[in-house]
Amino acid sequence: MSERIVVVGFGPVAARFIELIDPLLASGAAHLTVIGAEPDSAYNRVLVADVGVGRTSPETISLSDTARLAALGADVLLDRTVRRIDRARRQLQLSDGTVRAYDRLVLATGARPVIPYLAGLNPDPLHPALPPGVTALRDLADARALRAVVQRRGDVVILGGGILGLEAALAAAEEGARVSVVHHGDYPLARNIDDDGGRVLAATLRRQGVRLVSGAKAVGLEHTATGEFTALRLDDGRFVSGDLLVLSCGVRPRTELADGAGLPIRSGILVDHSLTVHHDEFIHAIGDCAEVSCLDPDCADCAGDTTPSGLIGPGWKQAEWLADFLGRQLAPSDVAAVEASGTPFGATSGAGGSSSSYREAALPPVVMLKARGLDAVVAGDVSANLWSGHDDGTAVALWADPQHGRYAKIVTRDGVLSGLVCIGMPRTGAELVLLFESGSVLPEDRSSLLPLDGAEEQASSSPNRDPSATVCRCAGVSRGSIEQAAVVGCSTVVEVSASTRAGTGCGGCHADIRGIIEEHFQTAPA
Amino acid sequence: MSERIVVVGFGPVAARFIELIDPLLASGAAHLTVIGAEPDSAYNRVLVADVGVGRTSPETISLSDTARLAALGADVLLDRTVRRIDRARRQLQLSDGTVRAYDRLVLATGARPVIPYLAGLNPDPLHPALPPGVTALRDLADARALRAVVQRRGDVVILGGGILGLEAALAAAEEGARVSVVHHGDYPLARNIDDDGGRVLAATLRRQGVRLVSGAKAVGLEHTATGEFTALRLDDGRFVSGDLLVLSCGVRPRTELADGAGLPIRSGILVDHSLTVHHDEFIHAIGDCAEVSCLDPDCADCAGDTTPSGLIGPGWKQAEWLADFLGRQLAPSDVAAVEASGTPFGATSGAGGSSSSYREAALPPVVMLKARGLDAVVAGDVSANLWSGHDDGTAVALWADPQHGRYAKIVTRDGVLSGLVCIGMPRTGAELVLLFESGSVLPEDRSSLLPLDGAEEQASSSPNRDPSATVCRCAGVSRGSIEQAAVVGCSTVVEVSASTRAGTGCGGCHADIRGIIEEHFQTAPA
């Protein structure tokens, strides 16, 4: 009998999972229902801001092959939500009044934007009814609202100085909008970056045309008689006026459905190392809504902070792992053979495949900001002071050239890179990230790490030719895999993306992929 | 008739002048009298501290060929001084009661150490009778006093945080003495260096075993019943005790003899661009006692600060120029031919020779500190703040790695290097000095200037192979000249010094000369 798999949520993580269980569906071993709250099929949510500024289109960022799903007999239920999980009967009550039974339930409900407490905003976090002219820039409807303002070169006010707010700000400013970023602290990215790096970042943002309203605490909205947003009110009496307010105050895992079903929640829905929720073997959770933290109090992997990262990379790894896990449980032997021969995107790549338990990568995340005219990366703990004596083996080295927007702070512990800030030096930043992730001991002369961004070096090829170096952090694709794709004939970024999935996430690695392709065709024997 | 040339002073500048008028003496066109206040013939005063710590000997640093002078019939009068110049009769009254007539008088009286006002020190600056255990480290007698303390690994107290005090401190500490440097401000070299550079410098000095007594104002000496120095007393009540106090508070031109003869004085004895004193064509002044400032109020060369530099390089250039000038005035045609064929050291090299007037180099001096374990260089104006906005075209870039004692501050004005601090990065420092002296526009990516001091780069050869680059700043010898000396067979520093004079001053370039020699013999065809 066919196993009924129901996926709740139709974002990029759900789409990846669905793509990878194709052999189960094709063989008839499983039947799929997908339930999406939005009217659209899955798309690359990371690129919503790019749609909003007109750099790409909703069609281009689509992640779902609806024709294929129809051919496989899957039920795709859009524009509706799940009201309740009936775990005893293993069935779902939907917002349209229907009921769906499941044998396996996969929760991929993602995250919702944090709506700050501001006078004039609906404070119900589960059903935020934002007034006209206010958006959280999370879905395609939000993108359309931004697009309208950017097209008429209007004023965009962004509340929040985090990475997503800055990316949206830079893109909107570059496409012609007048942009203000309203944020806490003396500079944006204040949670990640050090003081001096923050200064260089702020100056660079200003050079890129972004107005910064620093040290600001927003308290309310001003609006027209018909409720249209006109200005943000700050606690010191200032107003920041604009045509559109973009709320970029972070996201929280969307857990209320699981909560209502009595599943254990911390930040996210708690799952063990088989991505199964605690105490219910028929329910799984993946992506932004899932928190991997098992029941073993001595588990080293779960000892630290297990809050969901909010990044696409770990979510995709979870999708790959769970598809593989279910495939092994449900597939008859002939399907296992189909699976081994490979799906279009290679089902056993990445964290999926052979491992018997899913483990989060131990490394703290790397914050990257890539925009025309601004390239910044921050990783690890960068709070150590340059001039303080450190008796714990910490050492700090610094390059600062603020007039040229260049800055690099290198923090080591016993010689191993433990924190970095790099602004305006993209190749140096990439090299430092590699050294950070590999836990390398740095050369004693740290200045040898800097000169990768000179004119000569940029003219020549990539600094690091280690084939195992990660180029696409979202999909976890190495330099070697991309070189291999070029060897077998891929000559554009689109072709490399189709072949390897490199570049299918945030797109920040497109320039690197292009560089590797060019290098291949330059050095290839004629 | 033979022209009577009398030289007053027998230091390195006088010695260089005497060496270069050899053809005039040999031909009988001139007769020489040299009057030296010390019991020793000329020696390389720059290396007195090295004699004091036992690194070299008085014999090695001698600069005078007494046998040659005797053969030329010169009168060398040591251990006596000139009491008075009788300009009307063109004769000198000496301290031994005798009288010497001159046709040409060359004043090379040098500079005296500044003796600070401290309770317990004789305050007469012209005849400082320093108590036992106190020295100014200016002559060989001072060197002997230091040597005795260093040999028994005693306590040396150095008053003054200038370049000479630091060099003596580092050398004495390395040779086993316990050394304290007592200085104004938060760090040594406070007149030259910026705050952050000062911190790195101070930390490096401490690592080299030098104790720093910072922010100190000395007010008096403590001594034994028999007058031996025991401690320096500070104005805050602290005492810095030791076996020897070295006064390193700068030097002043020794001008009292010229002053007594009514010659015009400012900082030094004023001379015009023929190194002739104002209003007396028979008297010249060269070296530390001479200030080149002519009577033309519109002269661009004399518009700025004309205070004598205190460096050996300009003094030697003056000696060369004056010897050439007198040679042209006094030599019969056959001597001119001898001169043209060259003296052992090449009489027409450097600033001497063909130019019709002597001009000081326009560049501000470069402060260099070279010691085992510490390499620092400061030049130009380095006060510009890294973080301030500059609307005068000033830009600042900074590399700081304080835990490894490395620091570089690069100040530009309209892209041209206008100030630099470089500590712990000798090759980078050398490159920056070249760029500073040539007034070069820097590459926009200033970090490309840094990586010269990595392990790989040090293993390979010198970074700058420009043959016109100055290697020996004291004698003004270029890389090309040293390479040429290696081509014609010089295979040691001593041989290169004898052939080119490179390395005969402060000796700071010996490692560079060695490098050029090694490079030559590695790359020379077998």
Image (cartoon, coloured by chain):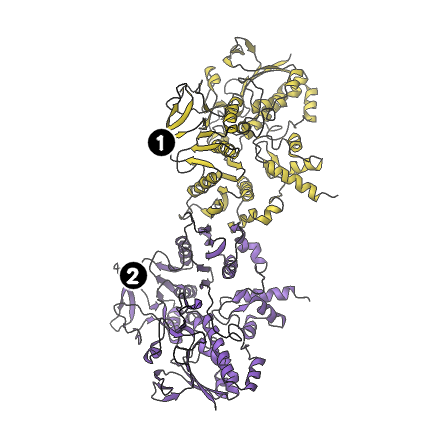
Chain colours: A yellow, B purple
- B291 or A284, nearer to the observer: B291
Of all chains, the one bearing label 1 is A
Q: Position of residue A131 (x, y in %)?
A: 43, 20
Q: Is residue B175 left or right of residue A347?
A: left
The picture places residue B107, in percent across and down from the top left corner, at 40, 79
Quarter of the figure with the C terminus of chain B: bottom right
Q: Is residue A32 above or below residue A219?
A: above
Label 2 element class: loop
Question: In this view of the protein, can residue B25 be seen by the observer?
Answer: yes
Crowding at dot 1, Cα within 10 Å, few <14 / some 14-19 / many 20+, comes out as few
Task: Point out residue A156 in the picture as x, y percentages from the top left corner.
Answer: 46, 29
Q: In this orientation, which residue lies closer to the viewer: A360 or A411?
A: A411
**Secondary structure under the numbered disc 1 in the rendered image:** loop
The answer to whether one can see residue A117 in this image is: no
Q: Residue at x 65, y 36 (%)?
A: A482
Q: Is residue B311 above or below residue B201?
A: below
**Snapshot quadrant of residue A118:** top left
Residue A10 bears which disc, if any?
A: none
Q: Are marks 1 and 2 in contact (CB under 8 Å)?
A: no
Mark 2, other Cα within 10 Å: few <14 / some 14–19 / many ≥20: some
At label 2, the amino acid type is: Lys
**Residue with the mark numbered 2:** B217
Amino acid carrying mark 1 in the image: Arg
User: In which quadrant of the rendered view does residue A105 lie?
Assistant: top right
**For residue A238, which numbered disc appears in the image?**
1
